[in-house]
Image (spheres, helix red, strand yellow):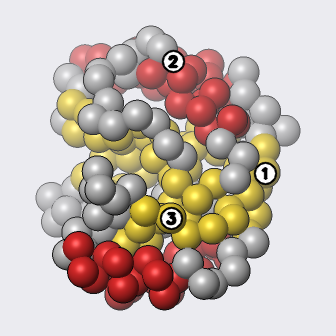
Amino acid sequence: MKYSIVVFPSSQVQEIANSYRKRYDPTFDLIPPYIRLKEAFELEEDRLPNLVSHLEQVAQSTDSFTAHFHRISTFHPTSNVIYIAVQNKEPFVALHEKIVKKCVNTPETYAYVPHLTIGRDLSNDELRDVTSQLSMHKIDLTSEIDSFHLIRPLEDGTWSVYQTFHLKK
């Protein structure tokens, strides 16, 4: 079965991200805006209890924190993704490292950069136009991060929360 591990920001941040995603992200209808902690990976069902146990330990050993989003950026030329950048990356990086340390030690396609995707699969010309337009917008958003989620895809392609893990207060 395929899984991923994500953080969903506050509804205010999601609303703003979705105002862009409706136009620039073909996965808009499949999953709410998220910050990926571990990209999608395959896991046999018999290993799921070990993963859940590990994620519970990670959550219990991690304090909740505030995420600050501060600008629009892109991963071009590596990929044609536009995202809202996270200013304080450290708590996300620490959480990512704890998660991948044990049960989810599958290789990542790219180096881990916490971000909130608002556009993907754009042509080079469209990416340049959209990025230059969006880079003029002032971004100053915060979101309390007090949980993360193990998610999995359903048959219709949407992603559903399998389990939520609450961070320490």
Rendered residue at 61%/23% (across/down): 58
Of 23 and 127, nearer the camera is: 127
Q: Circle 3 — which element? A: strand
The quarter holding residue 11 reads bottom right
Q: Is residue 111 left or right of residue 159?
A: right
Give yes or no for contact between labels 1 and 3 (Cβ–Cβ under 8 Å). Answer: no
Q: Amino acid at mark 1?
A: Thr
* Percent coordinates x, y for residue 153 in the rendering: 25, 52
Task: Tell me if residue 53 can be seen.
Answer: no
Task: Tell me if residue 90 can be seen.
Answer: yes
Rendered residue at 20%/23% (across/down): 44
Give the mark toward the camera: 1 or 3.
3
| Structural distance between the alpha carbons of marks 1 and 3 | 20 Å
- Residue furthest right as drawn: 169
Q: Amino acid at mark 3?
A: Ser
The disc, 1 or 2, on the residue closer to the chain's N-terminal end is 2
Q: Mark 1 sits on what residue?
A: 66
The answer to whether 123 is drawn above or below residue 54 in the figure is below
Q: Quadrant of the C terminus?
A: top right
- Rate crowding at label 3 as few (under 14), some (14 to 19) or many (20 or more) other CA atoms within 10 Å: some
* Percent coordinates x, y for residue 31 in the rendering: 37, 65
Q: Mark 2 sits on what residue?
A: 54
Q: Mark 3 sits on what residue?
A: 73
Give the mark toward the camera: 1 or 2.
1
Q: Circle 1 — which element? A: strand
Q: Which mark is residue 16?
A: none
The disc, 1 or 3, on the residue closer to the chain's N-terminal end is 1
| Structural distance between the alpha carbons of marks 1 and 2 | 23 Å
Rendered residue at 29%/56% (across/down): 77
